[in-house]
Amino acid sequence: MMPLTMLNSGETAEIKRIKGRDDVKRFLENLGFVTGEEVRVVSSNEGNIIVQVKDSRVAVSKGIANKIMI
């Protein structure tokens, strides 16, 4: 397993685990980040990563992306 931040733009992976406090996990689940879901990195810049999960694009900070294990 590795954090989502290790994917390059255009790469897809399956979410294996969400780390962090319960409120962080709940927040990510509400955005569609759930175990077993496919996630694709659309783009990455210095502070944020834009990912496609389910049918929506979501921008998350690299700190939050480090809690999403693929």
Image: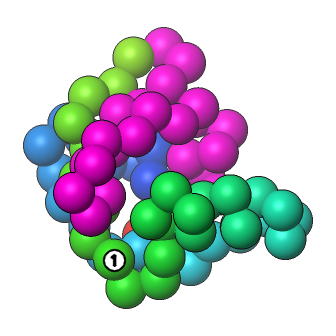
Residue 11, placed above or below residue 26? above
**Residue 62, position in %: x, y?**
57, 34
In the image, 69 versus 50, the foreground residue is 50
Q: Answer whether residue 46 is visible to the viewer in this image.
A: yes
Relative to 47, does residue 61 appear above or below in the rendering?
Answer: below
> Who's the residue at 40% across and 48% down the image?
6
Q: Secondary structure at mark 1?
A: loop
Residue 50 position, x and y percent, is: 35, 34
Q: Residue at x 55, y 18 (%)?
A: 47
Q: Is residue 52 above or below residue 35?
A: above
Q: Give, as a three-letter code, the residue at label 1.
A: Glu
Residue nearer the viewer, 62 or 1:
62
Label 1 neighbour load within 10 Å: few <14, some 14-19, many 20+: some
Q: Could you tell me if residue 69 is visible in this image?
A: no
The residue located at (48%, 14%) in the rendering is 46
Q: Quadrant of residue 25?
A: bottom right
Question: What's the residue at 34%, 26% (across, down)?
Answer: 44
Residue with the mark numbered 1: 37
The magenta span reads 46-69
